[in-house]
Image (tube, rainbow, N blue to C red):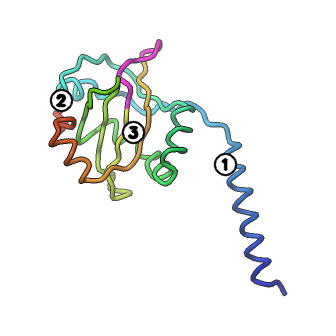
Amino acid sequence: MRHDVDIKADSEVAVNIAERHAMAVKKVDLVICALPCDTVNCTIETELEAGEVILSRAAQAHAERRHPVDYPLCLPHLAVVVADPLYIGDDLQNEGIELIARVPAIGEFVLVAVNIVPDASGRYHIASFYMVSEKKIASRREKGYLKVAKKA
């Protein structure tokens, strides 16, 4: 007969092994979807060219490190947010835009930050992604940083 202490120790060991395995799995760059350039250009008056949006290994590591709770929840829904954003924003502080949509599967708004300077292959890179509150969305809309996406 085993004691509760032994079972707890075994489960902690199993969790540590699983965490080390997850860290050891090599990430690959992910092609998410095409950037909805017509919608972005119409909404925030840019002149972006058509291109794919990718999530690089480095951006995955960044998002996982900075937003460890949000990362696994948001990752499967990035294409939905990028392809059909509810809000599009530009805070004018960097070379990127914010695409935001409500994701019914997790019941939250998800923000995907995308660099608008394409790489040599014409691809746009996701800088980060995380959940964002309705309060923060309202604040950014009031400041003029976020606009309701205009479908072209």
Residue tagged 2: 43
Residue tagged 1: 22
Mark 2 and mark 1 lie on one chain; the one further toward the N terminus is 1
Residue 98 at what x, y percent from top left? 31, 35
- Amino acid carrying label 1: it is Ala
Q: Is residue 75 magenta?
A: no
Front one among 146 and 81: 146
Number of residues whose C-alpha sits closer than 10 Å to that of mark 2, classed few (under 14), some (14–19) or many (20 or more)? some
Going by the image, does 74 lie left or right of 144? right
Label ID, residue 10: none
Q: Are marks 2 and 1 in contact (CB under 8 Å)?
A: no
Number of residues whose C-alpha sits closer than 10 Å to that of mark 3, classed few (under 14), some (14–19) or many (20 or more)? some
Helix, strand or loop under label 2: helix
Q: Is residue 116 magenta?
A: yes
Mark 2 and mark 3 lie on one chain; the one further toward the N terminus is 2
> Residues under labels 1 and 3: Cα distance?
23 Å
- Amino acid carrying label 3: it is Ala
> Residues under labels 2 and 1: Cα distance?
39 Å
